[in-house]
Amino acid sequence: MQTIQANNYPIYFNEKGYEALNSFLNESKYSNLFIIVDNNTNEFCLSRFLPFLETNLTIEIVEFEAGEPNKNIETCVQIWNVLTELGADRKSLIINVGGGVVTDLGGFVASTFKRGIDFIHIPTTLLSMVDASVGGKTGVDLGNLKNQIGVINVPKMVLIDTQYLETLSKKEMRSGLAEMLKHGLIYDATYWGKFLDLKAIDFADFDELIYRSVEIKNEIVTQDPTEKNIRKALNFGHTLGHAIESYFLENENKESLLHGEAIAIGMILESFISLEKGLITPDEYHQIKSTIKTIYDDVVFEESDIEPILELLIHDKKNEYGNIQFALIDGIGKIMINQSVENELILKAFEDYKS
Ligand SMILES: NC(=O)c1ccc[n+]([C@@H]2O[C@H](COP(=O)([O-])OP(=O)(O)OC[C@H]3O[C@@H](n4cnc5c(N)ncnc54)[C@H](O)[C@@H]3O)[C@@H](O)[C@H]2O)c1
Ligand SMILES: [Zn+2]
């Protein structure tokens, strides 16, 4: 598969990536190398990754406990301390091997350590391959506020090796799939069409689907790296999805949702809003709703859940001047950004989701 060129960094695929990584390490003058992992990627991914590495640099593995609740500043402080103790300096390189939690947090740790050192992403979940590792957003959560603290800063390279997915659970695969569906809905109707009959997808074709998804994300981000306009398209499903995700994360009586599971609900709700605004047809809406509902279990929303979810929306960083702004689809494969939506319509969307 061809290398994809992003703004200032290449995205390599599969084995070719390791050759590129080794040449990069041999040509660059790094002082030492730190590999950031969580306990799962330490267990499942380093046994594949380390044998590919050909370098004389000293390598230190820095591990933290897996999971979104650890994507916070306390974990960063621990890692900054470890880096300091182990002699990291301005010429150290960080390689993040993991899912979106590792790439977001590791990218942020690198971007802030000694005012910024170089880093590379090796995404190991579907979600981080098609989404989190591309586009330069790094950061951590603040309490239950997702990605409240962070910077935009690009890696030196991204290496996508789909072999890592072999050990990933079905649930996590489904979570990543949500972002792929999103890429189709906002940018490429033909691509969306490939997901209408999931049973027909051959796993051998899956690499191609991942590749196209990365291409779409990269095309959008390259046009608008700092999210002034078109990059907001990627927020489709996320305005409500993030609020739902935060609500389920903070509520002890609820089982928390994976990012993609929350986004899947957000995409149904926001498609309903698109329908009500006359942007998509009833047929398009029903196709979206039924396709997503076949893949993801229904989530129950009580009457008392909706108000706190709306409250959380206000904290969403995409809201400028207190206005809740949505990216809505304008037909499948096209997007319309900066759409205001009244609360009433949001409530109606939740009602429809339940039906
Ligand atoms: N920066 C961005 O643009 C961007 C975009 C989308 C999402 N994100 C962020 O990404 C995060 C979600 O990423 P995620 O879904 O990858 O979650 P994650 O990093 O928590 O990974 C999910 C789980 O899978 C485990 N895991 C990772 N790779 C594995 C493998 N190969 N085999 C077995 N287990 C493995 C992890 O340890 C974890 O338990 C969220 O914090 C979200 O905010 C960032
Ligand atoms: Zn997302």
Image (cartoon, helix red, strand yellow):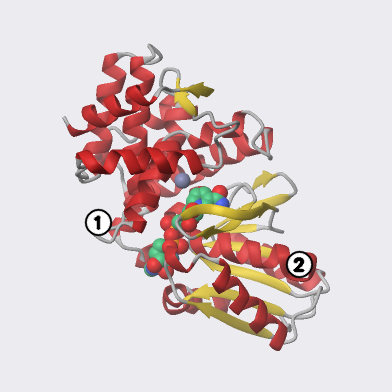
Residue occupying image coordinates x 22% and y 27%: 352
Check disc 1: other Cα within 10 Å, few if <14, some if 14-19, many if 20+: few
Relative height, residue 230 to residue 108 (above, below)? above
One can see residue 129 in this view:
no
The image position of residue 264, as x and y in percent, is 34, 40
- Identity of the residue furthest to the left in this view: 355
* Residue at image location 31% in from the left, 32% down from the top: 268
**SS type, badge 1:** loop
Question: Can you tell me whether the CB of the residue at mark 1 lies under 8 Å from the nearest atom of ligand 1?
Answer: no
Query: According to the image, label 1 marks what residue?
Result: 254
Q: Earlier in the sequence, mark 1 or mark 2?
A: 2
Which residue is label 2 attached to? 117
**Residue 150 image offset from top left, x and y in percent:** 63, 55
Q: Is residue 44 left or right of residue 171?
A: right
Image quadrant in which you'd find residue 254? bottom left
Q: Is residue 35 left or right of residue 248?
A: right
Residue at the spot x=55%, y=35% of the render? Answer: 319
Q: Is residue 274 above or below residue 16?
A: above
